[in-house]
Amino acid sequence: MIDPPESASRSSSGKDGAPGVLGALRAATAERHELLHEIMPLSVNSVALRDYLAHLAILRDWLVPLEAWLGSFGDGPQSPAHLPAHSPVLPARFDRLALIAADLSHPSVDPHDRAGMPAPTVARAWRGDASAARRWGICYVIEGSQLGGAVLYAKLKDRLAPHPLEYLSAGRDSLGARWQVFLRAMAAEVDTATLIDEACRGAADAFDRLIELARCPATAACVNAD
């Protein structure tokens, strides 16, 4: 689900040779990452549009409380200085929930498949440590999932046509540059062992909630780390 480019891997160590924040995040979430690859709806060998809809429904229920919580901050990864809205290279922050809603309601979706989709989960607000470092870890998972979505788009665009797969294709031409900007900003702010540990906990929390939803998308309760 998160597949950073090779150039990111080469820069994942700190100045003293110890793992930097990227290397630590990848190590802390590797097993969760592999598990998600196995249990998300798009992991099946023969993907149908209904599998994509199920994938979107899980992401929707994951992102609703996360986006609301993250949107209440103005520092760290939510600082206006990062990924600026008027950059000539990078898109503004994606309205992921709007993209999901548009894909779920696209005219190419069979009414039977739409009727079989689980209703949105009623989720409590995301809670827990609100430090910028923890939020960097959470956003690492969210931003990385968008990068992985571009890979899925290339794999599925012909198979699931005429559905446009807007969620997977959003901003794909600039995602590599966006990812590098994100990594540089995160590395500049999350630069001590304590902060790196906080970021790793945030990333693990985000993965764990997504895994919970993927395992039982229709019934998972919103349980977050305190």
Image (cartoon, rainbow, N blue to C red):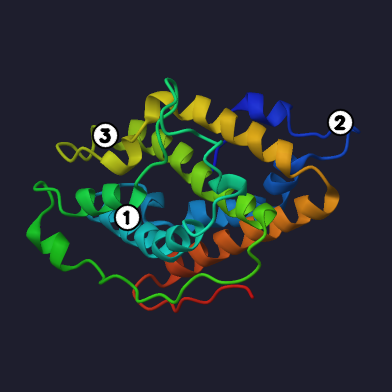
Crowding near the residue tagged with mark 2, few <14, some 14–19, many ≥20 C-alpha atoms within 10 Å: few
Pick the front one: 162 or 198: 198
| Residue under the image location 65 percent in, 50 percent down | 30
Which residue corresponds to mark 2? 15
In the rendered view, does 144 fall on the left or right side of 122?
right
Q: Residues within 10 Å of mark 3 (few under 14, many from 20)?
A: some
Judge whether residue 1 can be spotted in this image. no
Disc with the residue nearer the chain's start (1 vs 2): 2
**What secondary structure is marked by label 2?**
loop
- Specify the amino acid type for callout 2: Lys
Residue 24 in percent (x, y) is at 75, 46
Residue depicted at x 51% and y 56%: 36
Is 179 or 163 nearer to us in this picture?
Answer: 179
Q: Pointer 1 and pointer 3: residues touching (CB < 8 Å)?
A: no
Disc 1 on helix, strand or loop? Answer: helix
The amino acid sitting under disc 3 is: Lys
Image location of residue 222, percent across then percent down: 47, 76
Q: Identify the residue shown where x is 50% and y is 49%.
A: 142
**Residue 56 badge:** 1
* 5, above or below 100, in the image: above
Q: Which residue does the numbered mark 3 point to in the structure image? A: 157
Q: Position of residue 77 (x, y in %)?
A: 58, 46
- Of the residues shown, which amino acid type is indicated by label 1? Leu
Distance of label 2 from label 3 (alpha carbons): 41 Å
Between the C-alphas of marks 1 and 3, the distance is 15 Å
